[in-house]
Image (cartoon, rainbow, N blue to C red):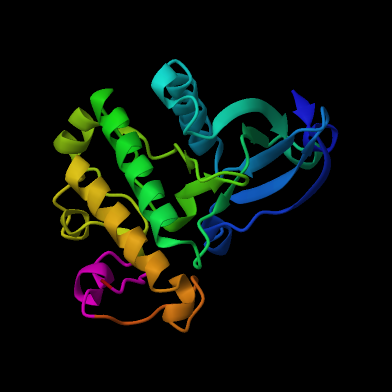
């Protein structure tokens, strides 16, 4: 297992919602072979093991090879005992000023990915703005963050409540569980979010709280990030 310093020739902080709530650190940089990559340091070893398991599972599904950011390697963070994921390819956030045709095309691609996961019997569980990326040079959709991936059967049986508060489906907010329909509902909210100008339309940054008419549901969860506008 290689130290991160040997994996990356240079690195910089990667814009990530998860960096704001302190649960994970994400860096982008150049790998030792000259290719671009992402280094992700999950909050715990258990989270890392879960994501590695899910990424290895997806690697066996050929229909998802070009639309998911996959595991390239496992390194160590700052020469410490903590492990970190090395991921490829590198994507970018959907720009707020994207052309409408391009945005709708991306949403159709993501809906197709949701369908492909469902056909395999799985749900992503956290379809948020920061997990729906595009390739840097093309309008090709890239799905990231497979930590919350779970089976449809388990989601129905356990209720499976997870996601980003701003973009959760109503059934998830009401603790009625996660279904394929709530995945597509989250995609719809991301579409509105981008069209409205993202965080700028709220006049706040992602880590600040605001109170909305949906707060009645979210407040009961005692969430650290209780932001929702839909």
Q: Main secondary structure of the magenta part?
A: loop
Q: Residue at x 84, y 38 (%)?
A: 5
Give the answer, above or below, for where 229 lies relative to 91.
below
Closer to the camera, 108 or 220?
108
* Residue 111 lies in the magenta-colored region: no
Q: Which of the 4 image quarters holds residue 82?
A: top right
Residue at 65% across / 36% down in the picture? 84
The quadrant where residue 165 appears = bottom left
Residue sitting at x 47%, y 74%: 199
Return the x and y of residue 80 as percentages of the image width and height. Answer: 76, 38
Residue 18, percent from left and from top: 53, 56
Name the residue: 63% across, 41% down: 90
Judge whether residue 218 is colored magenta.
Answer: yes
Asked whether residue 193 is in view, the answer is yes
The region drawn magenta spans 213-229
Depth order, front residue of 32/54:
32
Residue 61 showing in the rendered view: no
- Give the percent coordinates (x, y) of residue 167: 32, 60
In the picture, the quarter occupied by the C terminus is bottom left
Q: Is residue 25 above or below residue 118?
A: below
Is 215 on the left-hand or right-hand side of 6? left
In the rendered image, the vertical position of residue 210 relative to residue 174, given as above or below: below
Quadrant of the snapshot with the N terminus: top right
Count of marks placed on residues: 0
Quarter of the image holding residue 73? top right
């Amino acid at each position: 297992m290689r130290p991160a310093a040997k994996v990356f020739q240079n690195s910089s902080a990667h814009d990530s919602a998860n960096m704001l709530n302190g649960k994970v650190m994400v860096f982008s940089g150049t790998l030792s072979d000259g290719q671009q990559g992402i280094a992700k340091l999950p909050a715990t070893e258990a989270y890392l093991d879960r994501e590695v398991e899910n990424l290895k599972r997806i690697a066996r599904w050929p229909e998802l090879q070009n639309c998911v950011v996959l595991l390239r390697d496992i390194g160590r963070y700052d020469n410490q005992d903590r492990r970190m994921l090395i991921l490829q390819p590198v994507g970018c956030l959907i720009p707020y000023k994207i052309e409408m045709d391009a945005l709708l095309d991306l949403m159709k691609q993501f809906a197709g990915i949701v369908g492909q996961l469902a056909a395999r019997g799985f749900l992503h569980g956290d379809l948020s703005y920061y997990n729906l990326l595009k390739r840097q040079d093309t309008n090709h959709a890239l799905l990231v963050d497979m930590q919350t991936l779970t089976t449809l059967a388990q989601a129905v049986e356990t209720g499976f409540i997870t996601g980003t508060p701003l973009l959760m489906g109503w059934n998830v907010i009401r603790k009625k569980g996660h279904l394929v329909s709530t995945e597509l509902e989250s995609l719809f909210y991301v579409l509105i979010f981008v069209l409205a100008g993202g965080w700028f339309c709220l006049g706040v940054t992602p880590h600040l709280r605001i109170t909305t008419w949906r707060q009645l549901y979210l407040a009961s969860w005692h969430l650290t990030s209780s932001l929702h506008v839909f």
